[in-house]
Amino acid sequence: MCRWMDFNRRAFEFWTSVATAQVHAAMTIATRLAMLMNSSTPAARRRAEREAREMVVEKAEAITEGARRGMFAAFRLAATPRTHPAAIAGALIGVGRDTFEPARRKVRANARRLSRP
């Protein structure tokens, strides 16, 4: 029973991190859209162009880091034998969490950075 409790806890923590990342992503998208649409002055236009370049770079970095971390987590999973279904499912949640973590961190940092006045 303890393994299933651990699995439920890990699944809930992962779900919570995904849900919070969705909120942060919505905040970031709304702020960036307003920024990109406002090109009334040369300074605003330069800031929007810089932000657009940053969007592309940070997505590539997050994808690369997430793929690398997910691959290592999958290798750890394959190297450690597990027989209980809850342990296997929990380990798979760990792979998903490790893969998602770089994107979650970046989205949260962007939401904080862009929400500052």
Image (cartoon, rainbow, N blue to C red):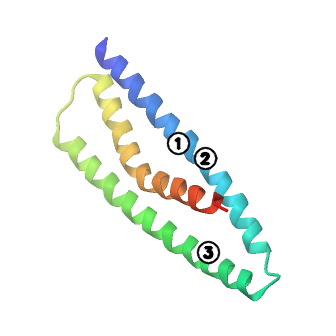
Cβ–Cβ below 8 Å for labels 3 and 1? no
What residue is rendered at 73% in x and 73% in y?
36
Residue type beneath disc 1:
Val
Residue lying at 62% horizontally and 62% vertically, measured from the top left: 114
Report which residue position mark 2 lands on.
22
Which of the labelled discs sits on residue 51, or is there none? 3
Expressed as whole percent of the image width and height from the top left, the position of residue 4 reads: 35, 18
Reading the image, the residue beneath label 1 is 18
Residue 103 horizontal side relative to residue 79, left or right: right
Mark 1 element type: helix
* Gap between marks 3 and 1 measured at Cα: 24 Å
Q: Quadrant of residue 32?
A: bottom right
Q: Which of these two is toward me, 74 or 11?
A: 11
In this view of the protein, which residue sits in the foreground, 50 or 82?
50
Q: Is residue 81 left or right of residue 101?
A: left
Q: Quadrant of residue 44?
A: bottom right
Q: Nearest to the eye among marks 3 and 1: give it.
A: 3
